[in-house]
Image (cartoon, rainbow, N blue to C red):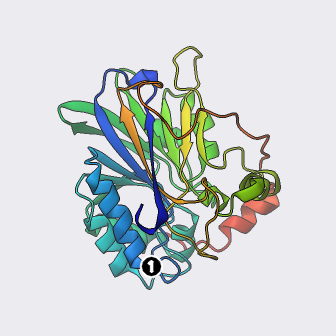
Amino acid sequence: MPHDIALRRFAGPEAHRGLSLRIAHLTDQHVGRITPMEVQRAAVAMTNAEKPDLVCLTGDFVGHNLRYLDDLEEVIRGFDAPVVATLGNHDHWAGADAVRATLRRGGAEVLDNAHTIITLKHQRLQVVGLDDAFTGQADRARAVRGLRGDLPSLGLSHIGEEADGLWRHGVALVLAGHTHAGQITSLGLGELLVGKLAGHKYVHGLYGSRSNATPATGALYVGAGVGATAIPWRTGDRGKREVAIFELGQTAGAFPEHHDEQPALAGRRPSARMRAFRARFRRPA
């Protein structure tokens, strides 16, 4: 694959069986100095080659500043399909308003604790977007207010742990990012650093259940991301840059998938002190 970007493909949940839609998921582009634009363009080209019906982006579009917004707009404009997006912690730390404006200039619909109904190939899909939970901006109650129970729903959140709450509102599949899969995943380092040390339940890949057997549950996919903010290196299969494709309407077993659903790690809730620390660098919206 160009620039060692992995293309991973998964079936959708049983709750989406009535659909026939292809969804592309990218996350953590971190457009800027550490992630070259040729990598960004390669990820866009790989996505377009799959001819998705919808592109979903789950935050951290920038790194530590707003110097590369023109490049970010180019990336968003490059997608052939409609784009929906939610923000991540770096977007808030750098300047959420400027990032939102850039995404919208590029043609993306930004969902800040809101949901929308999108019609694709004469099929309606509800997309729920949470603002960033890492910096304390997520408001699930607001996002799901008025959500229809008779339409299939897809959730977007920068932080994977928010899926637990969205499942209770009938959102059968949630897409997330933030972790970069740990980036260095050899010898289990990704789960050690991001899971046990940082306290995340969901590090990378497919979690939960895509079956309808258990009420108030669903599936979560945590993407490995395209970019980086500190070190550019990635090792191990899980740590590769990634474009993920979801075939809504197909069920598990219909085609080979990268991996099966996996159990969550123990995880732990961040302390009040840690939550305050995460939010302190956020520029006011």
Relative to 113, residue 96 above or below:
below
Instruction: Give the camera-side residue of 135 and 240.
Output: 240
Relative to 199, residue 9 above or below:
above
Asked if residue 102 can be seen in this view, the reply is no
Residue type, mark 1 in image: Pro
Residue 242 position, x and y percent, is: 48, 56
Relative to 78, residue 113 above or below:
above
Label 1 sits on a secondary structure element that is loop
Relative to 217, residue 59 above or below:
below
Residue marked by disc 1: 36
Snapshot quadrant of residue 26: bottom left
Residue 14 position, x and y percent, is: 44, 21
Task: Name the residue at the top extreme.
Answer: 213
Residue 259 position, x and y percent, is: 57, 38
Residue at left offset 42%, top offset 60%: 1
Asked if residue 233 can be seen in this view, the reply is yes
Residue at left offset 41%, top offset 25%: 254
Snapshot quadrant of residue 115: top left
Residue at left offset 29%, top offset 35%: 21
Apparent side of residue 258 relative to residue 85 in the rendered image (left or right): right
Residue 186 position, x and y percent, is: 71, 58
Instruction: Give the camera-side residue of 126 and 189.
Output: 189
Residue at left offset 60%, top offset 71%: 282
